[in-house]
Image (cartoon, rainbow, N blue to C red):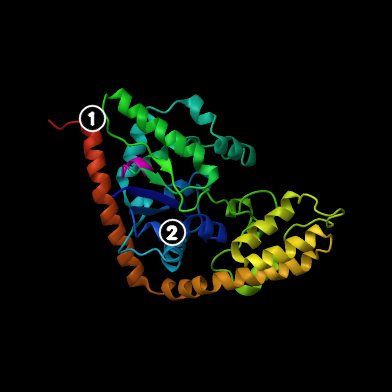
Amino acid sequence: METVVSGIRSTGKLHLGNYYGAIQNFVKMQHEYNCYFFIADLHSLTTHPTPADLHGNVKQVLVEYLAAGIDPEKATIYIQSDVPEIAELYLYMNMNAYLGELERSTSFKDKVRAHPDNVNAGLLTYPVLMAADILIHKATKVPVGKDQEQHLEMARTFGNRFNRLYNVDYFPEPYAFNFSANLVKIPGLDGKGKMGKSEGEANAVYLSDPPEVIRKKVMRAVTDGGPTTENQEKPAEIQNLFDLLKVVSSAETLQHFDALYNKCQIRYGDLKKQLAEDMVIAAAPIRERIEAIANDAPYLRKVANLGAEKAHQSALKTIKEVREIVGFRKF
């Protein structure tokens, strides 16, 4: 059975972009593959080196993983920092990662521009840690969004480089994997890119948001003055709203508003009201499960401990073999 590895950073609540872009695929995969789904608390330190509540953030993601349908009996759900072998493999891989290739990473350059006062070594070597997350379980399938495809290419580079340096055929090549034909990217409400917390609170609709919060966020979404000619191309901020409709609304709803836009009869207030209500409906069952699971401390402890043990067993085998390949041996 092929192994799948993926994770989400523990910077707080999960949003609809996480759910439709990743977690729905996680839920499907757990029935057919050997799945490792982790909460990336080490990764979160690259952009949030002094988190106000790291443990609370980890708990929130764990709760929402479970509420969204990931089954700890079918998949291994674990916290990244509970598996120290990941950090050890990260160290070995860093020895064979070159400065130039790390500096060329698109996400690194984007983060440098966005946060010039927080350009740390962890941010630079983020792709190496991501590679360690994947290679520690010798995964061949990685469900990632389009923004992570370059990192996955670098994971293949680091694994293949290790194989060449030590003249072994040890690490398999991991590839992007999605149950749908294309990798999913869920747009944000600001019209500037993907939905994500790093782009601002108002940009994302969270799975735990109450209905009134969802409605306020959607009604504040960026729009323009409306189309001036029939069948004109939609600008990015308007296309984003239609892309969101495509995800949470019926095909008939999407067609209705698309036809109004093409005839220059669109009223953005009506579109956003419909979008907000469909988001409320989509998030409602998950939000209810979040509220129930969050208060079950024994269950959360059981899930975290079970996942840590299962992930540790897999990682320990890899590290033992990597140490032997590199040449570390006890006297």
Q: Position of residue 47 (x, y in %)?
A: 53, 45
Q: Is residue 207 visible?
A: yes
Q: Position of residue 117 (x, y in %)?
A: 60, 39
Residue 288 on the magenta span: no
Q: Magenta stretch: give its range.
A: 133-138
Along the viewing direction, whichever of 262 and 53 lies nearer the viewer: 262
Q: Position of residue 281 (x, y in %)?
A: 58, 73
Residue 135 on the magenta span: yes
Q: Earlier in the sequence, mark 2 or mark 1?
A: 2
Q: Which mark is residue 325?
A: 1
Callout 2 secondary element? helix
Along the viewing direction, whichever of 266 and 305 lies nearer the viewer: 266
Q: Is residue 126 above or below residue 223?
A: above
Callout 1 secondary element? helix
Q: Residue at x 48, y 49 (%)?
A: 44
Q: Position of residue 26 (x, y in %)?
A: 42, 57
For residue 174, what is the image quadrant?
top left
Q: Count of labels shown? A: 2
Circle 2 Cα neighbour tier, 10 Å, few/some/many (<14 / 14–19 / ≥20): many
In the image, taking residue 319 as reference, residue 296 lies left or right, namely right
Along the viewing direction, whichever of 226 and 214 lies nearer the viewer: 226
Circle 1 Cα neighbour tier, 10 Å, few/some/many (<14 / 14–19 / ≥20): some
Q: Amino acid at mark 1?
A: Ile
Q: Residue at x 31, y 42 (%)?
A: 138
- Which residue position is annotated with label 2? 58
In the image, taking residue 231 as reference, residue 78 lies left or right, namely left
**Labels 2, 1: front one:** 1
Q: Residue at x 32, y 64 (%)?
A: 303
The reply to whether discs 2 and 1 touch (Cβ–Cβ < 8 Å) is: no
Q: Amino acid at mark 2?
A: Val
